[in-house]
Image (cartoon, helix red, strand yellow):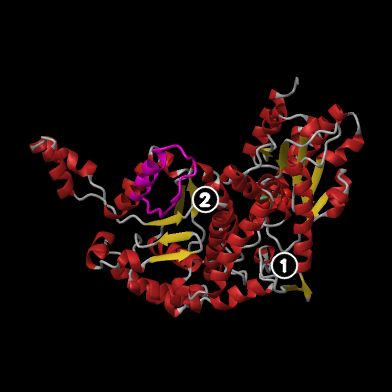
Amino acid sequence: MSALTQLPAWQALWDHFADAKHHHMRDLFDTDPQRAERYALEVGGLFLDYSKNRITDDTLRGLMQLAREAGLPAKLKAMFKGEKINSTENRAVLHVALRNRTNSPILVDGEDVMPKVNSVLARMGKFCHAIRSGEWLGYTHQPITDVVSIGIGGSDLGPLMVCSALKPFGHPRMNMHFVSNVDGAQLKETLKKVHPETTLFIVESKTFTTQETLTNALTAREWFVARARDEKAVAKHFVAVSTNKKAVAEFGIDPANMFEFWDWVGGRYSLWSAIGLPIMLYLGEENFTELLNGAHIMDQHFANASFEQNMPVLLAMIGIWYINYYGGGSHVIAPYDQYLHRLPAFIQQLDMESNGKQTCLDGSPVDFETAPIIWGETGINGQHAFFQLLHQGTHISPIDLICSLQNSSSLPGHHEILLANVFAQAEAFMRGKTAEEVREELAAQGLKGDALETLVPHKVFGGNRPTNTLLMDRLDPRNLGSLIALYEHKIFVQGVIWGINSFDQWGVELGKQLAKTIHAELAGKLDDAPHDSSTKALIRRYRRANAGL
Ligand code: F6P
């Protein structure tokens, strides 16, 4: 048995669950008129209504006790203090240092990291100002109009998601493009849209060894040099963001054009570092600082609020309740905001790459479920696609409904419809519709007898389906910063409860390793590598299909 399942609070919650699993939220609301008020919380510009969950005061008490017994208070302090909590890589985990707006010292191996953080931020600011103001000119003395960010995973999704989310704050001259897929189609289509004289390429890679990114960057460089006909022009059009100076230089980007970050910044937690360069270029230094400020507000709240009033802790522990007790293995992110359409993909990496693990910190296997499958889509589109399953399917899948109170599109009439749907969905998921209500409704439509009764079971909604409603005052850099930090800390808390390392990602290595051998085989440079019969047949088929090319 794992350490977690032996905790008294873990067992006490099972005892509570035996009774709690019979509760229906409809009854919980009926018996407590203050429920919505009591189960809500505001942090900065974010408001969380968590009342539409299958929880009672006893559930929350039990969950907070579990958080304490699992050692969350000490782990939280350890992260903020720069201790090497990423034990399999012997690294500190300090995305919080990147937005430590009070500038208080944070030590890693005895060295305060804040001067480095501030100096890179200042360099980024200077560079972005030069590009945005038109002072930085390309090789034909024209200002930059297009930025192509080349990266993948954490070196792509964060900047892509934030630039999409904050489009109304973007520089009007700047067109942002993101290339991540090694499928040449993405780069090819992007290059069709840009001109070498006015394009800046940012190669984003923590390790600067990632095959997809380096392949795309190399092709982009060749495309550029073929047009500029001058290697020296590269300096005006290519910059790199990395922790690996040597590899950047070997690739052919002058280290003077490199923005640095450090091994204590995890890839999926890196948008606050120099990896956020595309964000700063697009939004400007002030808005980037606001993004950091918003995250800092959430960091301070997370570090100082009592667990009972702590937004990341509440979301995490309520998540644990569903994952480990109800057996709900999936979680939906449904932003009701077109600008947030990449948020589900971003949170998917953040959560699944962090907590998709089955080994405890001490090397023993887990004997409980860990990260849920995170998926989602803009809520309103989801309603017309997969919400059927969420309402009447057999799975329990908690849903985060995320929207902003202020209209960001400024087109009259739209926002009210959007918000009406958010609130209606949350209500429908909670209440459902009883057979009695269905009967009444059908009777009012003139149906009776068998015709009515055959329809009833199909039109019943069980309800009791959990949602969190997250309202932002408005979608701006500060509130987005708080929102992202909220999810980062929620994921951290769940990792602590499960006793796993949320900050490594060994699970992505095996496929990468095998692909190297297979790549050589596809190119005809290697024969007879040991494979199963299926893999061998697939390789043969590819080679046959491409034999004459
Ligand atoms: O393969 C997974 C991963 O290592 C992610 O964790 C990371 O965000 C991504 O690849 C990109 O890595 P890099 O920034 O080193 O190119």
**Nearer the N terminus, badge 1 or badge 2?**
1
Which residue occupies the extreme top position in the image?
548
Q: Residue furthest left?
A: 449
Q: Is residue 271 visible?
A: no
Residue 543 located left or right of residue 251: left
Give the residues in magenta. Answer: 395-423
Q: Nearer the viewer, residue 410 or 162?
A: 410
| Viewer-closest of 495 and 292 | 292
The amino acid type found where label 2 is placed reads Leu
Disc 2 beta carbon < 8 A from ligand 1?
no
The residue shown at (64%, 55%) is 268
Residue plotted at (34% across, 52% down): 426
Where is residue 399? Give x, y as percent: 42, 53
Residue located 72% across and 67% down the image: 91
Disc 1, disc 2: CB below 8 Å?
no
Task: Describe the element under mark 2 as helix, strand or loop.
Answer: loop
| Residue topped by disc 1 | 91
Residue type indicated by callout 1: Arg
Q: Can you identify the residue that label 2 sits on?
A: 475
Quadrant in which the C terminus is drawn: top right
Of residues 468 and 324, which is closer to you in this image? Answer: 468
Quarter of image, res 361: bottom right
Could you tell me residue 464's position as x and y percent? 30, 56
Image location (x, y in percent) of residue 371: 52, 58
